[in-house]
Image (tube, rainbow, N blue to C red):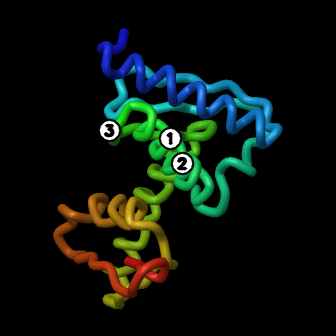
């Protein structure tokens, strides 16, 4: 189902993820989600909060480590994504709903609202959710880990 270049990526990434899960003593299964760009791995199991972390920070770190090891073995950078129990998809939906709800509040109160600090990928979800909104504009403020919408 995968082109030859992606077959190596899938094989190596699954091997790395399974080794990391063993080292962390986490019982889980690594599945490759079909028809995803980039290739996406979902870790399924019970009690996976340790792999998610606050707002998915541990998933992001795990993904970065796997990308580094894969890049070292394949000798080039490969795009891939890792999710844990569908957390990232649920988070994206929740952020989109939050953005729309807060846009209503901004319209009613005619006051700006500032969200908590969040990673660039989550700020992007907020910006895209409101990009076409006729009455509300978004922009990021702050520096580094303190950036917020």
Q: Which residue is mark 1?
A: 69
- Nearest to viewer (mark 2 / mark 1): 1
Label 3 element class: loop
1 or 3: tag closer to the N-terminus: 1
Residue at image location 31% in from the left, 89% down from the top: 110
Please state the horizontal and vertical placement of residue 75, each as a whole percent of the image: 35, 36
Please state the horizontal and vertical placement of residue 24, each as a whole percent of the image: 78, 43
Q: Which residue is mark 3?
A: 76
Question: Can you tell which quarter of the image residue 27 is in?
Answer: top right
Residue at image location 35% in from the left, 90% down from the top: 111
Please state the horizontal and vertical placement of residue 6, each as a whole percent of the image: 35, 22
**Quadrant in which the C terminus appears:** bottom left
Residue at image location 42% in from the left, 26% down from the top: 9
Name the residue at the bottom extreme. 111
Question: Can you tell which quarter of the image residue 81 is in?
Answer: top left
Q: Which mark is drawn over residue 4? A: none
Name the residue at the right extreme. 25
Name the residue at the top extreme. 1
Q: Residues within 10 Å of mark 2 (few under 14, many from 20)?
A: some
Nearer to me, 117 or 5: 5
Q: Is residue 81 above or below residue 34?
A: below
Q: Which mark is drawn over residue 65? A: 2
Nearer to me, 142 or 73: 73
How far, Cα to Cα, is label 1 from label 3?
Answer: 10 Å
> Residues at badges 2 and 1 in contact (C-beta under 8 Å)?
yes
Q: Residues within 10 Å of mark 3 (few under 14, many from 20)?
A: few
How far, Cα to Cα, is label 3 from label 2?
Answer: 14 Å
Label 1 element class: helix
**Quadrant in which the N terminus appears:** top left
3 or 2: tag closer to the N-terminus: 2
């Amino acid at each position: 189902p995968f082109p030859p270049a992606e077959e190596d990526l899938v094989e190596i990434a699954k091997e790395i993820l399974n080794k990391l899960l063993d080292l962390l003593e986490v019982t889980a299964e690594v599945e490759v989600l079909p028809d995803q760009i980039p290739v996406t791995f979902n870790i399924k199991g019970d009690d996976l909060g340790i792999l998610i972390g606050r707002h998915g920070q541990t998933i992001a770190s795990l993904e970065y480590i796997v990308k580094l090891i894969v890049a070292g073995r394949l000798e080039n950078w490969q795009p891939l994504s890792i999710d844990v129990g569908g957390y990232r998809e649920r988070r994206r939906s929740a952020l989109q709903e939050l953005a729309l709800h807060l846009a209503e509040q901004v319209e009613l109160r005619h006051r700006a609202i500032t969200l908590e600090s969040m990673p660039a990928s989550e700020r992007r979800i907020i910006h895209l959710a409101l990009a076409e909104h006729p009455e509300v504009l978004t922009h990021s403020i702050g520096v580094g880990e303190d950036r917020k919408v």
